[in-house]
Amino acid sequence: MKRTKKHYDRSFKEHAVKLSYERKSISATARELGLDYKLLLRWRKEHEKFSDASFQGKGVARLSVEQAEILRLNKLLEIQRKENEILKKAIGIISESDR
């Protein structure tokens, strides 16, 4: 018999983590939600480490707000560099044709 993995959405995970902090017993909270307590512990650790960036889903990088801003600014910088290269080449072509 093949076991299927259960997938929980982000809101469920956030709710489970919130409940685990509110209640004294993590294992009792996990049982109540139908989870393994180790899974709930892993979600808590992820939430502590990444805060709002936790539970992004498969293939999505977990970035903090600062890391996301740095990534955005680096992309913008690269676009500006490419535009500057194009303008330099255009100026070179125009100045050659004026001679």
Image (cartoon, rainbow, N blue to C red):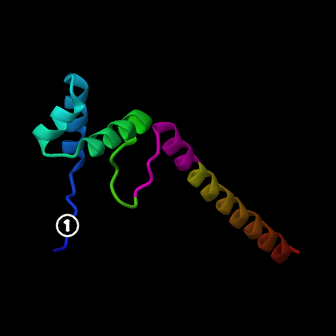
Q: Quadrant of residue 41?
A: top left
Q: Position of residue 24 (x, y in %)?
A: 21, 22
Q: Is residue 61 left or right of residue 77?
A: left
Camera-side residue of 89 and 69: 69
Whether residue 5 appears in magenta in the rendering, the answer is: no
Q: Is residue 51 left or right of residue 97?
A: left
Q: Residue at position x 16%, y 34% from top?
A: 29
Look at label 1 and name its amino acid. Answer: Thr
Q: Is residue 3 above or below residue 40?
A: below
Placement of the N terminus among the 4 image quadrants: bottom left
Q: Quadrant of residue 40?
A: top left
Q: Is residue 6 left or right of residue 45?
A: left
Q: Residue at position x 72%, y 64% from top?
A: 85
Q: Is residue 84 above or below residue 44?
A: below
Whether residue 68 appears in magenta in the rendering, the answer is: yes
Q: Quadrant of residue 57?
A: bottom left
Q: Is residue 36 left or right of residue 74?
A: left
The crowd level at tag 1 (other Cα within 10 Å; few <14, some 14-19, many 20+) is few
The residue under label 1 is 4
Residues shaded magenta: 60-73
Camera-side residue of 23 and 66: 23
Camera-side residue of 30 and 63: 30
Q: Is residue 82 above or below residue 22?
A: below
Q: Residue at position x 46%, y 45% from top?
A: 63
